[in-house]
């Protein structure tokens, strides 16, 4: 009898362990309201919607915390030189400088609650969530001078509307649906953007989902952009030619016989 009870208890324990292993894990699914943005001469900025849901989300019990979401939207990165202006003899000149190898052209982070209430600082740094955790391609920690230049870059990007941070930018609709909006300004750089959505519960990262967005110039603006950045010599020659033709036209139009 005792052996039968022990066998039954063992089978029950193994069944519970198997059920725990096969229990569905919460996963986040997300998408963007548009996958491509075309910039023309009348472009004045646009607001995009990032939305998603939590799969296998059950009704939380009183002892179980609700889900939290962090969204990180990054634009194409490029090297950037930060220079300090110094006044010499009444004239402002370029002083000390720092080179950051990989500065995002656009960066926005949204969350459902304050970042530190969602995850530990180590996790936020690993994910690059928050201004202090943006990866510029170089480690500035512990160097006051580099930190000063880094803060200046972030401040200038914020002023241009290219860096945004909102710790209340995500709202849940019900228990599993969520949404957040991102404003792309008129000066948004072109290229491939990524939108990383992270799902947390009790400070633990459960799932991640990534979407992409392409921003392009079209029409005459695209032609001018390609000439200026990919064929600068041709662009310069055309600019000189236009200036010469404009001067000749003005001379013929206003000359006195």
Image: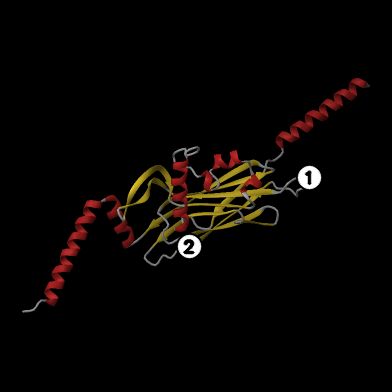
From the image, which quarter does the N terminus lie in?
top right
Residue drawn 65% across and 49% down? 68
Residue drawn 44% across and 38% down? 138
The image shows residue 86, relative to residue 244, as above or below, that is: above
Give the residue furthest to the front: 89
Residue drawn 21% across and 54% down? 234
Q: Nearer the viewer, residue 215 or 134?
A: 134
Mark 1 lies on a secondary structure that is loop
| Residue 257, percent from left and from top | 5, 79
Q: Which residue is mark 1?
A: 63
| Residue 182, percent from left and from top | 53, 58
Q: Is residue 27 visible?
A: no
Q: Is residue 134 left or right of residue 29?
A: left
Q: Which mark is residue 161?
A: none
Residue drawn 41% across and 43% down? 100
Number of marks in picture: 2
Q: Nearer the viewer, residue 92 or 99?
A: 92
Residue 216 found in image quarter = bottom left
Q: Is residue 207 visible?
A: yes
Q: Which mark is residue 46?
A: 2
Give the residue furthest to the left: 257
| Residue 36, percent from left and from top | 45, 56
Count neighbours of disc 2 (C-alpha within 10 A) and say few if under 14, some if 14 to 19, many if 20 or more: few
The image shows residue 216, relative to residue 136, as above or below, that is: below
Q: Nearer the viewer, residue 226 or 165?
A: 165
Give the residue furthest to the bottom: 257
Mark 2 lies on a secondary structure that is strand
Q: Is residue 139 left or right of residue 56?
A: left
């Amino acid at each position: 009898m005792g052996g039968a009870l022990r066998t039954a208890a063992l089978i029950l324990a193994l069944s519970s362990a198997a059920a725990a292993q096969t229990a569905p894990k919460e996963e986040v699914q997300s998408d963007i309201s548009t996958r491509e943005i075309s910039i023309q001469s009348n472009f004045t900025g646009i607001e995009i919607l990032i939305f998603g849901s939590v799969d296998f989300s059950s009704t939380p019990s009183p002892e179980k915390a609700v889900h939290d979401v962090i969204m990180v939207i990054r634009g194409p990165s490029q090297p950037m030189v930060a220079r300090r202006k110094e006044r010499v003899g009444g004239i402002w000149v370029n002083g000390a400088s720092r080179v950051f190898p990989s500065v995002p052209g656009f960066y926005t982070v949204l969350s459902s609650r304050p970042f530190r209430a969602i995850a530990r600082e180590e996790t936020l740094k690993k994910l690059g969530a928050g201004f202090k955790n943006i990866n510029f391609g170089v480690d500035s920690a512990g160097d006051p001078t580099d930190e000063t230049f880094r803060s200046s870059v972030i401040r200038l990007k914020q002023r241009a509307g290219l860096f945004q941070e909102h710790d209340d930018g995500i709202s849940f609709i019900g228990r599993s649906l969520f949404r957040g909006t991102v404003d792309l300004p008129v000066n948004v750089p072109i290229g491939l953007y990524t939108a990383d959505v992270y799902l947390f519960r009790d400070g633990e990262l459960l799932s991640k989902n990534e979407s992409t967005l392409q921003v392009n110039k079209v029409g005459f603006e695209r032609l001018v952009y390609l000439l200026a950045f990919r064929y600068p010599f041709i662009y310069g020659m055309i600019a000189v030619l236009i200036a010469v033709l404009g001067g000749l036209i003005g001379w013929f139009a206003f000359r006195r016989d």
